[in-house]
Image (tube, grey):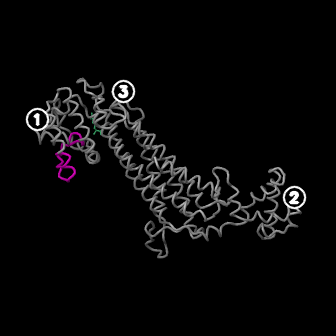
Amino acid sequence: TKQKLWGGRFTGKTDPLMHEFNLSLRYDRRMYAQDIRGSIAYAKALALRGILSQAEERKIVDGLTAVRKEWENGQFQIEPDDEDIHTANERRLSELIGSLGGKLHTGRSRNDQVATDMRLWLLDEVKEIEASLKALITVMVERADKEQDILMPGYTHLQRGQPIRWSHFLLSHAFSFQNDLQRLRQLIPRISVLPLGSGALAGNPFAVDREFLRRELGFESIAENSMWGVGDRDFIVEFMMWASLTMTHLSRIAEDLIIYSTAEFSFVTLSDAYSTGSSIMPQKKNPDSLELLRGKSGRIFGNLAGFIMTLKGLPSTYNKDLQEDKEPLFDTVDNISSCLRIAEGVIATLDAHKEKMEAALTMDILATDLADYLVRKGIPFRETHHISGRAVALAESRKCQLNDLTLEDYKTLNDKFSEDVHGVFDFEASVEKRNAIGGPSREMIARQINVLRKALAN
Ligand code: ARG
């Protein structure tokens, strides 16, 4: 059998199970394009220093391009000794162009190579994820704009609190996602750091031009310390932290919508496209899309927790433990990408039921407004809170609503009540009164929409 790439100093054979155990090609092959991009840039950098002639550089670049085509067309033949994407590509390059292929790895290590590939790969994915997140926010903003007429109860402790607009509810979640968008963008400068040229750990002895490599590969900056360059995986941790928090937000809106889609609430109906049925109960239409959004948040946090545990206690620079960065990162990227797209679809297609939401507006949720009414007549809020509470108790004992109490009833509670008290019992007016920045009035909904549209525009 052929010698392993690193086999020179070995006399004994690798245990077969150990051989399997060591392989990462099954999952790191998805970075083939980034690996080849990095290698092409590195070949050019070697040529700049005269380590490769121009003809040699050409041959290597053409060979690497051919290897990439094989991956693209599904023609790449994996050999049993292909340990990872780096060894596989190098092995194939040498098959195509001969021993010249062996010059490519001059001064380079898989340690700076893999760190470069991972960063390039993640930067590509972050672009896609950013687009999906923007699409999700856009759908929420557009719905909020269209459906401003729908009033609903706002909840604390899942108990009816005060009237709001449905738009205000949607936008409350959209602001979480806008913060996620901001945070995602803030990760980029720390992902976009070039490790290539760090060598195994002690840097590059061929004076390779790292500024050239940075420009070729589109990185924002260069790893200034080679040991840090090969050993750092904080950019992966940070991304998984970002994903965990974003999933928390997806999980929370999912939970709200699951509750709102029950027969008991009936505020929303999910479209058939995002629901599934029961194998036994014919009437069922289950919100599986939302439940999976909620459920996957646990898995994504698990990926973070697992990998941060892998990092803890590692000695400096590269250790093979770091190969364990890939599966959790890939799984996180795959799942958050689909979660964002599913959430967008669910929210774009659900039906919001104005009648049901407005039927849930009971007069008691205007008790704060009743207290505020007396505040406007000069009574301290702490007293008006109490008086309004007694009105609620009185209505409750009469089994009637706050607006069924007569002026005389109100006068027994406080003599500042007058005919205009009945103006309090108007949900639309209550919402419109909340016109300070951040409130649910039409003007403030418009303001929120404006803020979010601006954030989406850049
Ligand atoms: N497959 C390895 C990884 O994913 C590549 C780096 C291997 N480097 C080494 N010195 N063994 O981390």
Q: Are marks 3 and 1 in contact (CB under 8 Å)?
A: no
Q: Residues within 10 Å of mark 2 (few under 14, many from 20)?
A: few
Task: List the residue tagged with mark 1.
Answer: 99
Ligand 1 visible in quadrant: top left
Relative depth, front residue between 167 and 359: 167
Task: List the residue tagged with mark 3.
Answer: 224
First reached walking from the N terminus: tag 3 or tag 1:
1
Q: Which mark is residue 416?
A: 2
First reached walking from the N terminus: tag 3 or tag 2:
3
Per the model, the C-alpha gap separating discs 1 and 2 is 97 Å
Foreground disc of the pair 1, 2: 2
| Residue type (three-letter) at the residue carrying disc 2 | Lys
Where is residue 270 shown, x and y percent of the image? 49, 67
Report the span colored magenta. Answer: 66-88
Per the model, the C-alpha gap separating discs 3 and 1 is 33 Å
Relative depth, front residue between 273 and 423: 423
Secondary element at image label 1:
helix
Vertical relation: 425 (above or below) 89: below
| Quarter placement of the N terminus | top left
First reached walking from the N terminus: tag 1 or tag 2:
1
Q: Residue 33 carries which label?
A: none
Based on the picture, tell me whether residue 84 belongs to the magenta stretch: yes
| Residue type (three-letter) at the residue carrying disc 1 | Ser
Secondary element at image label 2:
loop
